[in-house]
Image (cartoon, rainbow, N blue to C red):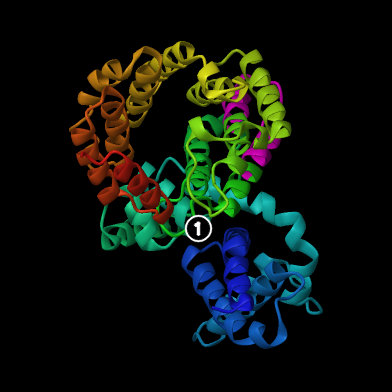
Amino acid sequence: MSDLHAAIERTFRDEHGRVLAGLIGNFGDFDVAEDALQDACVLALKQWPQSGIPANPAAWLTSVAKRRAIDRHRRDQNFTRQQAVIHGEMGYDQTSTPEAEAEHALEDTIPDERLKLMFTCCHPALAVDAQVALMLKSLCGLTIEETARAFMVTPVTMAQRIARAKHKIRDARIPYSVPAPELLPERLTAVMAAIYLIFNEGYAATSGDSLIRHELCDEAIRLGAFLCETLPQDAPIAAEPYGLLALMLLHHARTPARQDATGGLVRLKDQDRTRWDHTLIARGTALLDRAIALGRRGPYQLQAAISALHCEARAYADTDWPQIVGLYGALLEMHPSPVVALNHAIASGEAFGPQAGLALLSELAEALNAYAPYHLAVADCLRRTGDNVSAHHCYQKAHALAGNAREKAFIRSQMTSAAPE
């Protein structure tokens, strides 16, 4: 692949979510917006290799997608009525054009449009898995296959779920808007979950050749910051959004040290902490303090507090593992899940020894048997006890389940070093 084609693909990934959000806001229909954007991308693949990437690729894609959508309606037998509706919703007059509207309005309206899209997708009338699936596909630009892997279902099943959700939004006329303040709580939890899922996919990509998808991390942080700005600044309802933003910033601060010179995975214990972004750490810590001061504790604040303890430690050996175990225990009470229990077990193994970790991990064997990080955690504990034979077996399981090429390479290195003699 040429450098130009690689740049075009990166541009598509970077701009997909915000352009799609704007188009859905214009047309009020997911399918129309997605088809129009796909048409625009096809045209870009034909033209950009010759003309180069435009100075404002998002505006280019938006204007072309709008033209293509209007062209599709023109071919419809009811075009006259549909054209009036579309132009009326877009606010065009006789002298205005999609290109001019895109250039003038895109940068100012897209951030709000993206948040509107999130609140639309997270309407309580939709099933939670459908809410998050729509977020992953629309804002992350993940494929149906990638989204299906996140939910551990087949692509056909996932496609059906997303189609039903989009049709329900259209048929039930679910408003494309940020709800009134009194309705925020019923959607806020799902919106935050979607933002954090976007961040997690960027921070530790489930598939592909790159460990980190920086564009997704940056996008999630932007959305989290915009969400915080949208809410009442000093009201208790803002505590968890502040906690979520703090958590993402504290995690993201460690990104520069998470890969070696070849892009390989570097574990927390082996990271060069001088490479951490201490400006982000300061911002995240300040946001966490602000969240705690609002007096409404939640799971994101607890996770941010755990991340803050990691960031405060000058060296891995200085980590306050007993306090981290306590915070994970509180998180388990508030938000019980096998993955939280896994992290609690790993922290317990660090605080109280590998046997303590293995005892807790054994309780999760059935729930997490198909989860690569579980087998990796068991292997690490077994290795610390000196049982390299069992550790090697668990590394093999983790390697078979891992989907990311960098993660697989790391597990292979651990497997090799733990190979029984």
The C terminus sits in image quarter? top left
Q: Residue at (71%, 81%) from the top-left corner?
A: 52
Above or below, comparing residue 254 to residue 341 in the picture: below
Residue sitting farthest toward the front: 421
Task: Give the image location of residue 132, x and y in percent.
Answer: 43, 46
Task: Give the image location of residue 66, x and y in percent.
Answer: 63, 75
Q: Residue at (66%, 13%) from the top-left corner?
A: 293
Look at the numbered disc 1 and give the secondary structure of its residue.
helix
Task: Give the overall secondary structure of the magenta segment.
Answer: helix
Residue 148 occupies quadrant: bottom left
Above or below, comparing residue 68 to residue 219 in the picture: below
Task: Give the image location of residue 411, x and y in percent.
Answer: 35, 45
The N terminus sits in image quarter? bottom right
Q: Residues within 10 Å of mark 1 (few under 14, many from 20)?
A: many
Q: Is residue 23 magenta?
A: no
**What residue would you read off at disc 1?**
138
- Residue 201 horizontal side relative to residue 385, left or right: right
- Residue 6 horizontal side relative to residue 53, left or right: left
Q: Is residue 239 magenta?
A: yes
Let me know if residue 80 appears in the view.
Answer: no
Let me know if residue 74 appears in the view.
Answer: yes
Number of numbered discs visible in the structure rendering: 1
- The residues colored magenta run 223-244
Task: Give the image location of residue 207, x and y in percent.
Answer: 40, 56
- Which residue type carries mark 1? Ser
